[in-house]
Image (cartoon, rainbow, N blue to C red):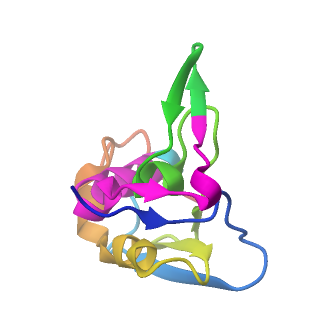
Amino acid sequence: MKKAIELPIRSSLIGKKEEVVISFNEEVQTFWLDIVEGFKQACRQHDLYHQPVEFPNNKKLFGKKGGTNIPINTLGRWLFGVPGSVGNVQLRPLSKISFQVTWAKGLPDEVADLLRSVTANQVKNHCQFWGDEKYKNTWM
């Protein structure tokens, strides 16, 4: 089993940040939430998404869906959140061909390694509606 990395309970996107810009080689041809989901799905393919995490003082974190606790026990769940708990990464559109991924500076290297590993082609391949005529002009 992989050794757990220690993360803060909540990171702050106020102050010093790290970021990566992901640029497509064409105008985005889908809607924003499809891009966000495509990015998450691309991250899920990486081993680091499933990296176990722990928190200071052995604190356990949970989200909740339908009365069921959902443990926040992997890097991916901590970054992107689970029902009932927000994540610790921010995505925002920049232009008709790019978006930005932002996270707090000073986190373990695994955070940057995971988020920087995703390519535009991986995101595009995980978008469910890319190229659908209905959504081509809804990006910005």
**Residue at 62% in and 48% down:** 59
Judged left or right of residue 70, residue 116 is left
Q: Residue at x 59, y 72 (%)?
A: 103
Report the span colored magenta.
34-62
86 relative position to 138: left or right: right
Question: Is residue 55 a member of the stretch shown in magenta?
Answer: yes
Residue 25 seen: no
Q: Name the spot of residue 11 as percent of width and height, x first.
A: 67, 66
Q: In the figure, 14 relative to 65: above or below?
A: below
Q: Is residue 113 magenta-colored?
A: no
Locate residue 104: give its quadrant.
bottom right
Q: Which residue reaches farthest right? A: 14
Q: Residue furthest top?
A: 66
Residue 124 image position (x, y, % from top left) = 29, 59
Quarter location, residue 35:
bottom left
Residue at 40% in and 68% down: 27
Relative to residue 112, is residue 81 drawn left or right? right
User: Residue 33's spot in the image, x, y percent?
Assistant: 50, 46
Towards the viewer: 3 or 26: 3
- Establish if 37 lies above or below 13: above
Name the chief secondary structure element in magenta. Answer: helix
In the rendered image of this protein, does residue 87 appear above or below residue 25? above
User: In terms of depth relative to the viewer, which is nearer, 85 or 101?
Assistant: 85
Residue located at (46% from left, 48% from top): 77
